[in-house]
Image: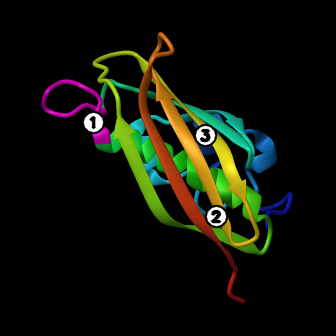
Amino acid sequence: MMDNFTPNPFVDELNEAGVPEEFHEWLSAHGVGALVVKLGIRFTEMSAERMVATMPVVGNTQVAGILHGGAHVVLAETLGSFAASLHAGRGRHAVGIEVGATHHRSVASGLVTGTCTAIHLGGTLATHEIVITDDKGRRLSTARITNMIRDNRH
């Protein structure tokens, strides 16, 4: 828990990633994660029910010059895991137990948007669907992630 006297070492990282200030305390111990920073993921909406973020294609391509399939999955897993963690609440955390994705079309430039929607928010499991689209709103991939909700160890 942060107090008014302890600076958050990740405040710049959280701001750059678009994390609303109301969530800074929640992410104050670890920030958004090194991979989220490297891929340029930026959040635009954050809740357990719906989470949205963008990611640039440039810098996240594979050898053929298109967005790497793994980058799709990282964006999807980031959104689903963050949403499940918000659902878990204080004293609990989310642990990913399954993720899968189907790639529908490729993209070689621009910004992609991941929209994460809750399918199930239970006491022990949270499942989210993530749809990734291009600048024109075309579906690039569809992913699903299930997280197990666990109590923190004391």
Q: Main secondary structure of the magenta part?
A: loop
Three-letter amino acid code of the residue under disc 1: His
Viewer-side label of 1, 3 = 3
Label located before the other in sequence (1 or 2): 2
Q: Position of residue 147 (x, y in %)?
A: 58, 64
Q: Does the image show residue 38?
A: yes
Q: In this view, does 123 lie above or below 110?
A: below
- C-alpha separation, residue under disc 1 versus residue under disc 2: 29 Å
As drawn, is 38 to the left or to the right of 129?
A: left
Q: Which residue is drawn at 35% across and 25% down?
A: 57
- C-alpha separation, residue under disc 1 versus residue under disc 3: 19 Å
Q: How crowded is mark 2: few (under 14 residues within 10 Å), some or many (20 or more)?
A: few
Query: Which quadrant would the C terminus be assigned to in this image?
Result: bottom right
Three-letter amino acid code of the residue under disc 2: Ala
Q: Is residue 26 above or below residue 142?
A: below
Q: Is residue 1 above or below residue 34?
A: below
Three-letter amino acid code of the residue under disc 3: Cys
Q: Position of residue 71 (x, y in %)?
A: 35, 40
Label 3, secondary structure: give it: strand
The span shown in magenta is: 60-69
Furthest toward the bottom, the residue is 154
Asked where in the image residue 99 lies, by quadrant, the reply is bottom left
Label located before the other in sequence (1 or 3): 1
Q: Where is residue 66 in the image (x, y as percent from the top left)?
A: 24, 25
Q: Which residue is drawn at 68% across and 87% down?
A: 153
**Residue placed under numbered mark 3 in the picture:** 116
**Residue placed under numbered mark 1 in the picture:** 68
Query: Which quadrant would the N terminus be assigned to in this image?
Result: bottom right
**Residue placed under numbered mark 2 in the picture:** 29
Whether residue 108 appears in magenta in the rendering, the answer is no
Label located before the other in sequence (3 or 2): 2
